[in-house]
Amino acid sequence: MARRGGGFPGGGMPGNMNNLMKQAQRMQRQMEETQKEMEEKEYEATAGGGAVTVRVSGKKEVISVKLSEEVVDPDDIEMLEDLIVAATNEALRKLEEDNTKSMEALTGGLNLGGGFPF
C-alpha cells in the first residue's frame, strides 16, 4: 500500500517548500536593495515658516541645519531649539513614511509580525 500525504517522498511538500524558500530569498534581496536606496535618500523639513530647515539622510542622520537670521534671537533660545526639534522630527517622520510605503509595496502590505521593520 502506498502512503499518501504524510511523508515527504511523493507528498509534494518539498517542492512547495523550495518555492517558498525561493520567494523568501527573492523578497530578502529586494528588501536589501530597497533599504540601500532608502539610505541614499535625503529628507528635508522646515519649521517656523521656513526659518529653520533640517535635512536628514535615509540613515536617520542629520545632514544639515539652516537658520534664518531673524530666528536667531539671543533672548529666545528656547524658541530656536523648539523649531530645530520640530523640523528634525518632521524630516524623520517623512523618512519613516517613505520607508513604510516602500516596504508595503515590496511585501504587498503583508504584515509578518514579530517586530520586523516592514
Image (spheres, rainbow, N blue to C red):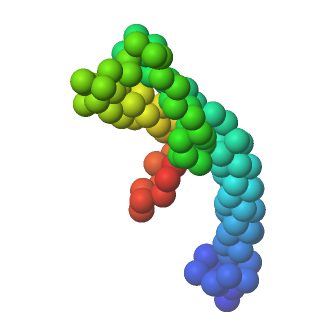
Quadrant for residue 99, please give it: top right
Q: Nearer the viewer, residue 50 or 118?
A: 50
Count of picture labels: 0
Q: Position of residue 30 (x, y in %)?
A: 72, 50
- Using the image, determine if residue 20 lies above or below residue 42: below
| Picture quarter with the N terminus | bottom right
Quadrant for residue 80, please give it: top left
Q: Position of residue 69 (x, y in %)?
A: 45, 16
Q: Nearer the viewer, residue 7 or 17?
A: 17
**Image point 74% across, 56% down: which residue?**
29
Q: Position of residue 101 (x, y in %)?
A: 55, 34
Q: Position of residue 48 (x, y in %)?
A: 37, 15
- Using the image, determine if residue 13 lies above or below residue 58: below
**Image point 63% across, 78% down: which residue?**
4
**Image point 38% across, 22% down: which residue?**
72
Instruction: Tell me: 10 left or right of 68.
Output: right
Quadrant for residue 55, please give it: top right
> Visible in this render: residue 102?
no
- Using the image, determine if residue 79 lies above or below residue 57: above
- Using the image, determine if residue 53 lies above or below residue 118: above
> Visible in this render: residue 14?
yes
Instruction: Tell me: 88 left or right of 27.
Output: left
